[in-house]
Image (cartoon, rainbow, N blue to C red):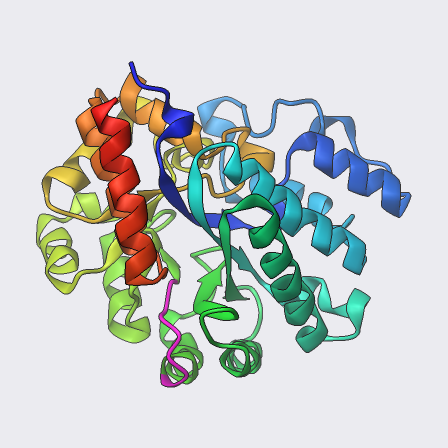
């Protein structure tokens, strides 16, 4: 079997704080002088019985981890380490998603937070060879007016070497999706594609709401679209790519077993699927592990895994010339 770490791929669904390893978290906690509870660093993550899995356990641990990110140095460390980790996994492009609101108080505001992350992304790209692009995201647990402020800042920094897309993350059950429509309109007017979360914790009905109101280019997750063939056909026809995170789906209790994740159903329907790690810190599973899962649990052949890698590259927001280069590298991997 071919080595999956050397398979060229793009990583389109990775969150800022969640991108860390446990070792990185411990390093930043020591730097900030903040002790961490044992259950956050015991390498068990969210490995709990199925009936104990769910969003609120995840969010509690995530907030604990986020509490150690209290300086510019910590923010730069996270971006740089995410790039190094992705480089080791064959990633050619990383689109790292960040809600700057949490970190803004420690660096002088939202604008400085975005500028620090963009600056470090450029430096990390040069160091690792991985194109690190930044997606700025609003949070569903904050007021939709906050999202408009963040969208305006994202728009101000939009560009090939700046912010490349606008997202909406956190608890999918929070708020009314239509309320975030104005923020996504601001982003679109600046040329920023929408990449909101939808279709993991909630099913097809909510996916339709996200598509109607937020007009996404990609859906963060979208896995529950598999439950509605007509919806899935509509997503395929509209060219909306899905950022699928199989390990996340299991750890959050969406599916009981890895073999239950309907990746093959989505692919067979013609969906453009990009595998992502989501939050390796808590799910203890990185990008290549998602491809390994597809191989071991879902029976994907190397040809099919190469197609998944191609889909991730095609769904990225990289230039067409870079995509062509990386797609040729996938062909070379398959020819080995």
Question: What is the quadrant of the C terminus in the image?
Answer: top left
Is the residue 171 above or below the residue 115 in the image? above
Is the residue 183 above or below the residue 102 in the image? below
Question: What is the quadrant of the N terminus in the image?
Answer: top left
Work out whether residue 188 or residue 4 is closer to the camera in this orientation and state it.
Answer: 4
The residue lying at 45 percent from left, 25 percent from top is 50
In magenta segment, residue 224: no
| Residue 19 in view here | no
Q: Position of residue 233 (x, y in %)?
A: 9, 54
Please provide the residue range marked out in magenta: 189-195
Quarter residue 215 falls in: bottom left
The residue lying at 23 percent from left, 63 percent from top is 208
The residue lying at 80 percent from left, 37 percent from top is 27
Predominant secondary structure, magenta span: loop
Is the residue 21 above or below the residue 271 in the image? above
Horizontal relation, residue 59 to residue 159: left or right: right
| Residue 252 in view here | yes
Quarter residue 207 falls in: bottom left
Q: Position of residue 294 (x, y in %)?
A: 29, 26
Work out whether residue 86 or residue 55 is closer to the camera in this orientation and state it.
Answer: 86
Is the residue 264 above or below the residue 72 in the image? above
Q: Position of residue 23 (x, y in %)?
A: 72, 30
The residue lying at 36 percent from left, 60 percent from top is 318
Q: Position of residue 86 (x, y in %)?
A: 51, 39
Query: Please, which residue is most extreme toward the top here?
Result: 1
């Amino acid at each position: 079997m071919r080595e999956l770490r050397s398979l060229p791929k793009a990583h389109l669904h990775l969150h800022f704080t969640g991108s860390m390893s446990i070792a990185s978290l411990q390093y930043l906690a020591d730097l900030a002088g903040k002790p961490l509870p044992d259950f956050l660093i015991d390498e068990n993550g969210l490995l709990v019985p199925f009936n104990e899995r769910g969003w609120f356990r995840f969010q509690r641990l995530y907030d604990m981890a986020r509490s150690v990110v209290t300086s510019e140095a910590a923010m730069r460390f996270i971006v740089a380490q995410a790039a190094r980790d992705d480089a080791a996994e064959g990633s050619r492009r990383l689109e790292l998603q960040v809600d700057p609101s949490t970190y803004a108080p420690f660096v002088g505001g939202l604008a400085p937070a975005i500028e620090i992350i963009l600056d470090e992304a450029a430096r990390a790209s040069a160091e690792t060879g991985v194109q690190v692009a930044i997606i700025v995201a609003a949070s569903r647990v904050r007021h939709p007016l906050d999202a408009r402020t963040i969208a305006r800042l994202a728009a101000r920094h939009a560009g090939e070497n700046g912010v490349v897309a606008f997202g909406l993350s956190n608890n999918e059950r929070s708020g009314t999706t239509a309320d975030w429509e104005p923020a996504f309109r601001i982003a679109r007017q600046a040329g920023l594609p929408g990449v909101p979360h939808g279709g993991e914790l909630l099913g097809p009905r909510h996916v339709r709401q996200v598509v109607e109101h937020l007009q996404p280019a990609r859906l963060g997750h979208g896995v529950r679209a598999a439950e509605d063939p007509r919806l899935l056909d509509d997503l395929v026809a509209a060219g909306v790519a899905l950022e699928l995170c199989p390990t996340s789906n299991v750890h959050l209790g969406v599916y009981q077993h890895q073999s239950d994740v309907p990746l093959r159903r989505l692919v067979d329907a013609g969906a453009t699927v990009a595998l992502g790690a989501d939050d390796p810190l808590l799910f203890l599973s990185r990008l290549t592990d998602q491809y390994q899962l597809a191989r071991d649990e879902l029976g994907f052949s190397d040809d099919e895994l190469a197609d998944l890698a191609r889909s991730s590259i095609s769904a990225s927001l990289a230039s067409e010339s870079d995509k062509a280069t990386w797609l040729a590298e996938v062909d070379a991997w398959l020819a080995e």
